[in-house]
């Protein structure tokens, strides 16, 4: 019995765009993946924290779990996109009967992910230092 072929380009795209809610984990590992469910759980946790504590806390702290999940998804997207095709096929497509052939679109996704992840990480660090040292005086 052959298994469905897992496309590396699609996995990289899903990890880049929808990674903070774990859709890439469900695509690659299936519905039983605990890390995918942990990614997905950060959305309702953040929304509930915003609903119940929204008036007393900074919004960035309330959406902290979702932000951390997004940063982890950026790293996972980079790992997926930079995995060589042979290793990808050995790990995710051993019985699919097809070979992966990544195109330049994967490279563009990796560059986009690296840029967005760097901007998000620098912004999170800057906002944390602003809150710690000035009490949020700059926003």
Image (tube, rainbow, N blue to C red):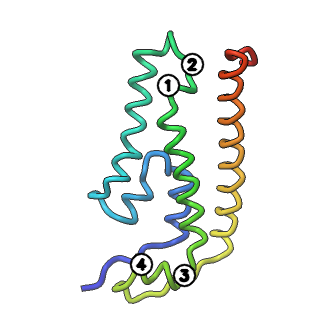
- Secondary structure under tag 4 reads helix
Q: CA distance from mark 1 to mark 4?
A: 37 Å
Taking the image as shown, residue 3 lies to the left or right of residue 92, namely: left
Residue 132 found in image quarter:
top right
Q: Residue at x 48, y 73 (%)?
A: 7
Q: Nearer the viewer, mark 1 or mark 3?
A: 1
Name the spot of residue 2 as percent of width and height, x first. Answer: 29, 84
Residue 137 appears in which quarter of the rendering? top right
| Residue annotated with mark 1 | 62
Q: Residue furthest bottom?
A: 97
Label 1, label 3: how far apart the Cα atoms are:
39 Å
Q: Residue at x 34, y 48 (%)?
A: 37
Gap in angstroms between the C-alphas marked 2 and 4: 42 Å
Residue 55: % across, % down: 50, 10
First in sequence: mark 4 vs mark 3: 3
List x then y, in percent, for residue 138: 75, 18
Q: Which mark is residue 58?
A: 2
Q: Mark 2: few, some, or many residues within 10 Å (few <14, many ≥20)?
A: few
Which residue corresponds to the image point at 52% horizontal and 52% vertical from the top-left?
Answer: 73
| CA distance separating discs 2 and 3 | 43 Å
Instruction: Kindly identify the residue that appears in the image at 43 percent across and 73 percent down.
Output: 6
The reply to whether the C-beta atoms of the residues labelled 1 and 4 are less than 8 Å apart is no
Q: Nearer the viewer, residue 98 or 15?
A: 15
* Disc 3 target residue: 85
- Identify the element where label 3 is drawn: helix
């Amino acid at each position: 019995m052959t298994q469905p072929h897992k496309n590396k380009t699609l996995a990289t795209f899903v990890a880049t765009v929808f990674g903070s809610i774990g859709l890439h984990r469900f695509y690659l590992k299936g519905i039983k993946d605990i890390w995918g469910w942990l990614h997905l759980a950060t959305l309702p946790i953040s929304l509930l924290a915003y609903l119940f504590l929204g008036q007393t806390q900074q919004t960035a702290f309330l959406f902290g779990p979702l932000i951390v999940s997004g940063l982890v998804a950026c790293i996972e997207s980079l790992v997926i996109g930079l995995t060589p095709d042979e290793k990808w096929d050995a790990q995710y497509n051993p019985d699919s009967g097809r070979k992966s052939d990544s195109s330049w679109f994967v490279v563009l996704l990796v560059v986009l992910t690296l840029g967005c992840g760097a901007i998000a990480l620098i912004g999170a660090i800057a906002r944390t230092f602003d809150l710690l040292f000035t009490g949020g005086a700059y926003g």
